[in-house]
Amino acid sequence: MSNNYDAIIIGGGHNGLVAAATLANAGKRVLVLEKRDVIGGAAATEELFPGYQVDTGVADAALFQDEIVQKLDLRRHGLTFHESSALLFAPQPDGRALTIWRDQPRTVAEIARFSERDAAQWPAFKQQVEQMTGLLRGMLLLTPPDLAGLHGGDLMAWGPLALRLRRLGGDDMMELMRVLPMATQAYLDEWFESDALKGALGGSAVIGTALGPRSAGTNLMFLYQNLGGLLNHRFVNGGIGRLSGALAAAAQARGAVIRTGAGVDKVLIEGDMEPTAVGVRLDSGEEIRAALVLSNADPRRTLFGLVGPTYLEPEVMNHVRNIIYRGTTARLNLVLSGLPQFVGQTDEAQLAGRIRVSPSLDYLERAYDASKYGRYSDHPYLEIFIPTVHDRTLSVNGDHIMTVTAQYAPYTLQEGDWEGQREAYTEVIMATLEAAAPGIRSLVRHSRAFMPPDLECIYGLTEGSIYHGQMGLDQMLVMRPIPEWSRYETPIRNLYLCGAGSHPGGGVTGAPGYNAARAALG
Amino acid sequence: MSKNNDYDAIVIGGGHNGLVAAAYLARAGKRTLVLEKRHLVGGASVTEEIFPGFKFTVFSYVVSLFRPEIIRDLNLPAHGLTILPLESTLTPTYDGRDYLYRDGDHYQTLRNIARFSQRDADAYDEYARYMYFMAKAVRYILGIIPPDPTTFNPRDMMGMVDMARHFLDLPQDQLYVLAKLMTMSAADFVEQWFESEPLKATLSASGIIGTFLGPRSPGTAYVLLHHYMGEIDGAYRAWGFHKGGTGGLAETLARAARAQGAEIRCNAGVARVNVRNGRTVGVVLENGDEINAPLVFSSLDPKQTFLKLVEPTALPDDLVNAVRRFQTVGSSGKVNLALDRAPELACRPGVGRHLAGAISMSPTLDYIERAYDDAKYGNFSKEPYIDVIIPSMIDPDMAPPGKHVMSCFVQYAPYKLADGEWTDAKREAFGDAVVDVLERAFPDIRSLILHRQVLTPVDIERIAGITEGNIFHGELNLSQLFFLRPAAGHAKYRTPIKGYYQCGSGTHPGGGIMGAPGRLGALEALKDGA
Amino acid sequence: MPLPTPFHSRTSAVCDSYEWRNWSGYLSAGIYEMSHDREYYAIRNSAALIDVSPLYKYEVTGPDAARLVDRVITRDVTRQRVGQVYYTPWCDTQGKVIDDGTVSRLDTNHFRVTSADPSARWFQDVGYGLNATVTNVTDDLAALALQGPLSRAILEQVVAGIDFARLAYFHLAHGTVDGFPITITRTGYTGDLGYELWVRPEYAERLWDCLVDKGSGYGILPAGIIALDVARIEAGLIMLAVDYVSSRHAVIESQKSSPYEIGLGWAVARKKGDFIGRRALATERAKGSTWGFVGVQYDWNALERLFADEDLPPHVAGRASRSAVPVYEAGNPGRHIGQITSHTFAPILKQYIGIGTVLNPHAQIGNRVDVEVTVEFKRKLCPATIVPTPFFDPPRKKA
């Protein structure tokens, strides 16, 4: 048994690595244990096919917090970003396409092709969204307040934010309170009339959730997804795995040890009256002790799988059991022998950002409807990236890599299971792609599809939920991951949650890892 | 009674909130006049003999939320308040052959639930207990004026502090259940406790009543709570049927208002509110008559209050915009049937007290959700959720001896249809869909129907005068509640026009036969020293 | 509508009073004759037959059954032998009592638990993640209590395969009656020598008939809940929803009680491993409980005087009362210090007694208090002394 560490991080996802680097920065001797052979979790770039570097999870790092980049000096560890001129490209069933450009006049002109009225509204809309997201951004790196104690210290931390809210002025603050819990459809309907524009925007509100654009609270998710700027993206040169790599390098530079192929079986718990984490046992049986254990695994996996429900009070156990996961995304990774030609596409540059097949809010809503009854969408919403448009180093032979996130693919199917439906759903995705980019089928060199149970199996995501728990109003802030335990601590002393299941939630923000590390440091 | 046309206060609309407001104003010594467009008072709380001998409680049909302080303040029992118990709920399964029955026999109810799920039976009391806690916690909200969280006005800040203290003083478990209720879907909330379909579906059905949302839509758990806030004789979440239908309650309120000295004039629709120099001076009736009063109350919905009764140009833009986008799309319909004799259920033949409660056509969550799916794309539900009561089983005066009336509250019937306007043919097709669903539970219902009244949201708008037929005067969602109802900065019953007040369901605490907006509106105006 | 129990054909045939109670949704005889005196004395003098089938009954089985039960109850299951029966409370996380009942260890990993309220969901939640199954067997088991000094003699006539001389207090044994299987626990709710008999419902009537047949020479008599209530107060035994409120039903915090506050502190095994409520109970034990459980004996002479003041004889020989009455500091009627939740005239002791909860430190044995008594519509105070329970504790109970 080795006992050379102050802190063990279970899981080398980006949040685990942020936590590791932050703890190492504070002088702790840190060990990161990653089950897979690659680090990064869902922020990894993997050679899925020989010679092709694929972002197997997330592709975009727009939400990653600059404070963390600076504190951990990630640029020195090789992190560079790329921002394309096209933010979003949305092919339409009528053969047209809507492109949102980084350049606002260009975007306004583009929207005017669909609706003059919407084009006129766009600048004000963008301004309102970015004003609100500006406020919400301040919440990311704060620990949610403790309602039971309402500690003075907590409120002090939230004070500046409250002041900024106040400074907004009564009208804007009221507007924020009105807008946050809305359904995105209702919000977008207040602004726009064009189905193409609303559909393109609406995807942000539902991605990764088992909710549709008419579901109340999706507007909060819409704002969350746009925290880095409306529809903005920020790619990591060399693939998102380079971000994880930079984090790992930052941690290692401070003495942290990262072990891959080291899956954790159990958190070791001692203490009679107060169960306390004292280390971990690996799948291999090896036991490693440390004073602090941080888990980057999702809350249910951590508390049920690694700890065990009998360490929890029944009320806490029930909260964990009731966390809504409901993974709804499937993933198709393709290697294409050439760049596909999308309908309505006139310029290769249009494909350099995000490509979204979501022609209307009703299209999204109908795709969601199927999932309510345990069926996959016949006409799924697709979120597509072709990173090779701006980064040729990722592939060979001039081939292109395309990652397609398809929604909705409910984790639990009403009939049959995903093993039996994998082919059929892959075909549904391909058919949807073919309609958006005719001829794409003939370009496919390699293809690999991941269904929600695959995501659970590979990344350890409960029910394939990419956010470690749905990002709905009922699972945010003081209710994330569960009531009374929203401050990264757990009922097991010295065990902390540092993954996306904790505040503020999913996406490559680094915030849960950063906040949890600071909470663990006390 | 005033001989001339000068009053201290005019209340526009003789619905239950208008009548409550009038009674409170008259009680405070104001010479008060209620102006009602129709030939009878009640608004959406009316009982009418649409078919000879059969009295339909036309729109609303049950009472639960009505505020006990109004009953006491206005001494309503002396004016005829008679709320008859309605304690059972029967949920037939989809095929109509089995059913879940819940009534006052506690242990039998648990056994009935256990037939579907033993675990649900075990959880039932605990669920009820939490809902009791929740009703107790939010009851406070029903009686207060929503403070404005954005101002530094001491009264508002104290109001916020009081409210924060009230909620933070709750035990932690209750506080979080409340937070979940405010944000979850009714289905998710109920599924934390239960697994059997008829129970889950019927409980979550309270979460969709009057809203344009399905049980799986976040926010519906709040509506579920809204329907749990009712109390009768100190018992939370008790439901009752007013003798003579909800029109009987309106008449009781009218008598109480008159007893306080208020005057009620029917067939007197208001065309507009007269405003001079930023303050109201009275109203102009549709027939051109002018009536003067320094105080005018609108119990109508916010869209009529701000966009129709006054010139929107007299109001600030932010208010006009907020009211324009206030979500008011109606989603409920009503089918009233005159029956030749008592209908019998296939799953429980015979005529007994099981017919004297609610019969909920809500066999599964998916059933209701599918009904919503139809509606969200602009169709009425092919197989709607129906809340049935048979008023004549509770109050024999509602129909000739041996005959019966059946009240069917139906969702969903969207105000706007995808394929154009509601027509007579579509209305009848909607009525047929309702009877088709009823027929699975009541196999001989079709042959018993002597007369059928079908009401869509368009009819509710036309007859009861509610914009888009929304029975709550506006969706009950987080964006339209409390200090946001009907609009930020205008949630305290006052309007930018001096002397012009709101007192309808479009204000805090919202819809249902509660009377709270009428009471709070009147009391706020009186507080202004008006 | 309350359901008949498996003994209903027999109990209804002899229930001359027609006085039925609804016990957890079952028909239960409150009293068979017009007065409960004979039924009570059957308990204390011969043998009484009491239908207790409405008790909720659960079986816990599976490899982790013992761990599950140990996590639920406050007593130490690791020390419970197969064949031993525990009487125990169980608590919520805050250490407040949810319910109390008996736990029979039928086998190493096979337990039978009785409770006053439905409990399966709680047991399942506490055992989530354990390899054990909780089954509701309420309707699969008929239960009959045979209580009284002659109960053993009767059973020896009726039951084959059990050596009653060796069946110790709070233990169980399996035997047969007329060829059908029966489980017998030496338990009861009377504080007397007594047994509880558990059979499948289809044998219920035969069991009743055998007992009545063989017991007639021993003065066996069916007894109802009213007689039982008197006996259980004499024995100092508490009742859910009467002497304490389950923390699952309490609507305000102050209605909840810890085991220490209802006289079950002895059943909290402080040295056992983790169980629900353990931490809270350890804290409470360290800093002391708010309430103490008490038995009180009313000052008979004073009581007589209170009645005499109204020119009445002491009118107290009725049924036990489950209406709580307030307790005041002796001689200080302004200081409310607790409540007597069950009280009765104890026929075997010729005393008026009660049980209840009193604020510490007033709950000390020997302390004098004033208890409210209503005489001729007037509220009066009767001096009483806090005494040890059980009030009545015959050696035969455990012999």
Image (cartoon, coloured by chain):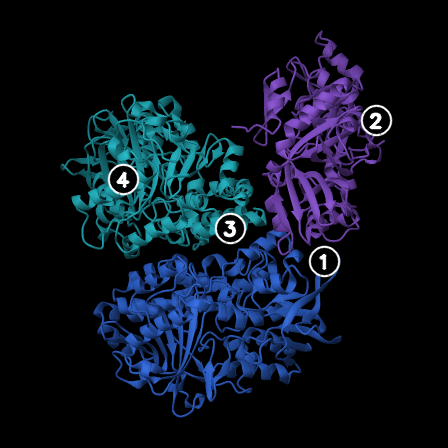
Q: Which chain is purple?
A: C
Which of discs 3 and 4 lies nearer the camera? The answer is 4
Q: Quadrant of the C terminus of chain A?
A: bottom right
The quarter of the picture where residue C106 lies is top right
- What amino acid is found at the position of numbered circle 2 in the picture? Pro
The residue beneath circle 1 is A274
* B430 lies above or below A281: above
How far apart are labels 4 and 1 at the CA level?
62 Å
The quarter of the picture where residue C253 lies is top right
* A485 lies above or below A336: above
How far apart are labels 3 and 1 at the CA level?
28 Å
The residue beneath circle 2 is C394
Please indicate, yes or no, whether residue B153 appears anywhere in the rendered image: no
As helix, strand or loop, the secondary structure at mark 1 comes to: loop
* B212 lies above or below B81: below
How far apart are labels 3 and 4 at the CA level?
33 Å
Which color was chain A given?
Answer: blue
Q: Position of residue B496 (x, y in %)?
A: 30, 49
Q: Which chain is cyan?
A: B
First reached walking from the N terminus: tag 3 or tag 4: 3
* A44 lies above or below B375: below
**How busy is the neighbourhood of tag 1: few (under 14 within 10 Å), some, or many (20 plus)?**
some
- What amino acid is found at the position of numbered circle 3 in the picture? Gln
Specify the subunit that label 1 lies on: A
Q: Are marks 1 and 2 on the same chain?
A: no
The residue beneath circle 3 is B192
